[in-house]
Image (spheres, rainbow, N blue to C red):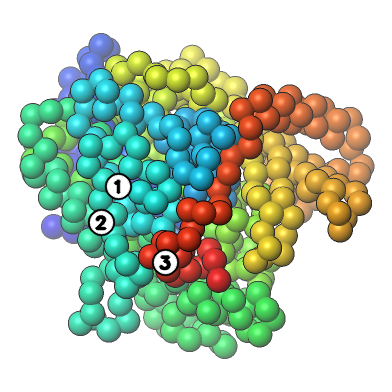
């Protein structure tokens, strides 16, 4: 059966099986994180290509969060915050993950397992914390789709196959399963939508070396090339969706559909040349929405929620607190993230402000950015440095200017002051725990360096 069709059958069956009793709750939970998946490339979020039949079917019976904001457009900071349920400080990330709400699930008796594809989401960076079983794809050669079909399978195949096999043997214990895949991250090799599209100066695939050439001005990218790159990216999105559909079909076959919560999201989005034609295939260099907005779809087969599409802004740090509350597990630590249930029940309607930040990068030659996205407005600040005496301030009215083309930082002093006050208050709260530390000694093993190099994160 086609995986997308299997997902439709799976959801229909689970909806009929569930009694939708007001006091019912799921017994198990699966969190699927599709790395570098920006919201608007998912069909239900507006992609004119039908890229995601399985996710669309899940959304049809679940709850869709239309404006889900990550705290950072790069994996280590975003995944750390997602699992901790709070913004990165030294309490969360200090040369590795220091806390995770997965620990609360394990301590409460849930069997916990993770299947990841290494890189930043690895034991090397502490992401095994809280998991009884933690498996990561090893070695650079497993990461990407082989150009030669006789070579090893792509990482996503290994990752999801491992998760499906684990479900076959999970037994009677309640479980929490994390599945993380770097698909559709660079390089882009999926030809699903690329056939027949002119590629101009590009090769058939878009590799890390091509991105480097573009950033150095050695590879001209016009609208023809960008359209081809977006088609390749969408092919990766559809590949991801295919494996989600297979996992949902496995739940159906194993009889786990009526008591398993399923949540699908991403750590951050992707630049596809929207405003920076030299940057397609990259992220972590700006705080524009194409890198911050991610899909978030939640399906709870045990209850029918009054709100099926939440328009107000939420944060990815709200995901784990929601899973804990739905499973009935007390939270182990304070945090900035809050359960999304009040929004799903229609008891809360306001936007939840989001702290956003990227660190300085010597590789990409940009300074630190930090800011605040309130839902209707956004503030972005590039602090003054030794090389730059004055800070740069961006203020955007997201209702009137959703593409963030008009910076009101100089013309709307009142709005700038109000947003700056909010940012400083949150910044002071975060400063009390000390700054998160991301790099340094933990990147020094050759295997991890090779994986990060293959992902384009280091030279």
Mark 1 vs 3, N-terminal side: 1
What residue is shown with label 2?
Answer: 159
Q: Nearer the viewer, mark 3 or mark 2?
A: 3
Disc 3 element: helix
Mark 3 vs 2, N-terminal side: 2
Mark 2 vs 1, N-terminal side: 2
- Foreground residue, 254 or 438? 438
User: Tags 2 and 1 in contact by the CB under 8 Å rule?
Assistant: yes
Q: Quadrant of residue 168?
A: top left
Disc 1 element: strand
Which disc number belongs to residue 179? 1
- The quadrant of the image that shows the N terminus is bottom left
Instruction: Tell me how far mark 1 sits from mark 3, CA to CA.
Output: 25 Å
User: Tags 3 and 2 in contact by the CB under 8 Å rule?
Assistant: no
Position of 4 relative to 396 (above/below): below
Disc 2 element: helix
Q: Residue 210 in the image: x percent, y percent?
A: 54, 79
Q: Quadrant of residue 132?
A: top left
Query: Can I make out residue 376 in this image?
Result: no
Q: Residue 259 in the image: x percent, y percent?
A: 18, 28
Count residues near mark 2 (Cα–Cα under 10 Å), then give few for <14, some for 14-19, many for 20+.
Answer: many
**Residue shown at 22% from the left, 42% from the top:** 133
**Residue shown at 8% from the left, 29% from the top:** 172
Q: Residue 447 in the image: x percent, y percent?
A: 38, 65
**Residue shown at 85% from the left, 48% from the top:** 384
Viewed as shown, does residue 24 lie left or right of 380?
left
**Residue shown at 25% from the left, 20% from the top:** 108
Which disc number belongs to residue 446? 3
């Amino acid at each position: 059966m086609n995986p997308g069709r299997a997902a439709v059958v799976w959801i229909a069956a689970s909806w009929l099986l569930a009694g939708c009793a007001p006091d019912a709750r799921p017994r198990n939970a699966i969190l699927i994180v599709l790395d570098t998946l920006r919201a608007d490339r998912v069909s239900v979020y507006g992609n004119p290509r039908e890229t995601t039949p399985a996710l669309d079917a899940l959304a049809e019976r679940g709850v869709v969060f239309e404006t889900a904001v990550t705290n950072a457009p790069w994996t280590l900071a975003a995944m750390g915050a997602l699992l901790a349920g709070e913004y990165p400080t030294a309490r969360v990330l200090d040369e590795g993950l220091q806390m995770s709400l997965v620990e609360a699930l394990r301590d409460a008796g849930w069997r916990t397992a993770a299947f990841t594809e290494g890189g930043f989401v690895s034991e090397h960076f502490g992401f095994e914390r809280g998991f009884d079983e933690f498996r990561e794809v090893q070695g650079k050669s497993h990461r990407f789709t082989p150009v030669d079909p006789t070579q090893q399978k792509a990482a996503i195949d290994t990752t999801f196959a491992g998760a499906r096999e684990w479900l076959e043997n999970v037994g009677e214990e309640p479980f929490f399963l994390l599945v993380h895949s770097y698909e559709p991250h660079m390089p882009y090799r999926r030809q699903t939508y690329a056939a027949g599209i002119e590629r101009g100066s590009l090769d058939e695939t878009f590799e890390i070396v091509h991105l480097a050439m573009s950033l150095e001005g050695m590879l001209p990218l016009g609208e023809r090339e960008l359209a081809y790159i977006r088609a390749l990216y969408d092919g990766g999105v559809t590949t991801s969706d295919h494996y989600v559909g297979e996992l949902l079909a496995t739940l159906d076959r194993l009889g786990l559909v009526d008591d398993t919560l399923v949540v699908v999201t991403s750590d951050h989005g992707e630049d596809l040349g929207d405003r920076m034609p030299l940057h397609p295939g990259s992220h972590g260099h700006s705080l524009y929405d194409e890198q911050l907005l991610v899909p978030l779809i939640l399906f709870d087969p045990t209850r029918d929620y009054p709100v099926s599409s939440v328009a107000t802004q939420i944060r990815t740090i709200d995901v784990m607190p929601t899973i804990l509350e739905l499973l009935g597990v007390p939270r182990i630590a304070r945090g900035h993230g809050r359960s999304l249930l009040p929004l799903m029940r229609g008891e809360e309607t306001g936007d939840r402000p989001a702290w956003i930040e990227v660190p300085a990068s010597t590789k990409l030659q940009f300074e630190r950015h930090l800011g605040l996205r309130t839902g209707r407005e956004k503030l972005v600040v590039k602090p003054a440095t030794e090389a730059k005496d004055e800070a740069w301030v961006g203020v955007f009215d997201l209702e009137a200017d959703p593409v963030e083309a008009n910076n009101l930082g100089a013309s709307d002093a009142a709005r700038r002051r109000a947003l700056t006050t909010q940012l400083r208050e949150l910044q002071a709260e975060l400063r009390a725990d000390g700054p998160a530390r991301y790099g340094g000694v933990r990147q020094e093993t050759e295997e991890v360096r090779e994986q990060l190099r293959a992902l384009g994160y280091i030279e």
